[in-house]
Image: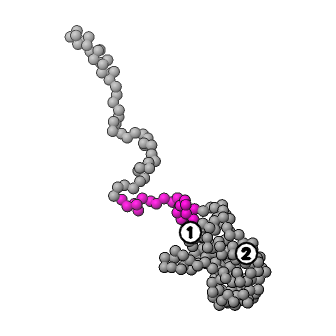
Amino acid sequence: MRLIKILLPTLMLAACSQPTPPANEAAAPSTSPPVTAPTAAEDAPQAGLSPDAVEPSTAATPDTAPPVAGTDSAATPADASAEAEGGARERITKLLGDAAPYESVFNELQRGVAAGDRAAVAGLMRYPVRVTIAGKNQKVADAAAFQRDYDRIVTPALATLIAEQKFDTLFVNWQGVMLGQGEVWINGTCLDKECTKSDVKVNNIGQ
């Protein structure tokens, strides 16, 4: 009996010191977890899905592909200016073949017109040659007819245009070489099937 009286206070003290358990261990936390933004990997299409399964980007894209270096499409305004001032030989070679015959005809035309040498100028034409006389286009059949109408074809204004034209600034395309705004055209015709040789002449002249 004495032992019970001794142990009873100890047991009561131990019982009072136990921690109180939480009211509901399964209860959800009072605040919701933070929302995280999807990563690049989460936004990418999953394997097995078509590209249509992902919303397309709204970012603007260029209408055309960027120019490729080394091509005409990559030329800047500065490049175009440089070409206009010194690329006639290169353009002729690229589009028409050997540039030497074109330069030779150009130089002979300038010399002949400057000297008033009708026969020399007439010899540079491809007949029948298209000419402009008094604002009307017509064809001249041969060198004799060209020399007869020389003064009406090669007017002072046209002679000045030819004299002031620089070879390096000639306009060139697949049709030939142009002086001025088209007052004179020089082109070539193939002399063989492979066009390894060509006959370069003036095929249009006049204002």
Is 69 included in the stretch rendered in magenta? yes
Residue located beneath label 2 in the image: 111
Q: Is residue 57 something that shows in the picture?
A: yes
Mark 1, Cα crowd under 10 Å, few <14 / some 14-19 / many 20+, is: some
- Extreme-top residue of the structure: 2
Q: Is residue 20 above or below residue 2?
A: below
- Judged by its main secondary structure, the magenta piece is loop
Could you say whether the residue bearing mark 1 is in a helix, strand or loop?
helix
Residue 87, horizontal then vertical, whole percent: 63, 65
Q: Is residue 181 visible?
A: no
Nearest to the observer: residue 78 or residue 41: 78
Is residue 29 or residue 1 the one in the foreground?
29
Question: What is the quadrant of residue 121 in the picture?
Answer: bottom right
Q: Mark 2, residues whose alpha carbon is within 10 Å: few (<14), some, or many (≥20)?
A: some
Stretch in magenta = 49-74
Name the quadrant of the N terminus: top left
Whether the magenta-drawn stretch holds residue 66 is answered as: yes
Q: Amino acid at mark 2?
A: Arg
Residue 142 falls in which quadrant of the image? Answer: bottom right
Q: Residue at x 42, y 59 (%)?
A: 54
The residue pinned by badge 1 equals 94
Question: Which residue is located at x 60 percent, y 70 percent?
Answer: 99
Q: Is residue 161 left or right of residue 79?
A: right
Coordinates of residue 171 in the picture (x, y in percent): 65, 72
Q: Hey, which quadrant is residue 48 in on the image?
A: bottom left
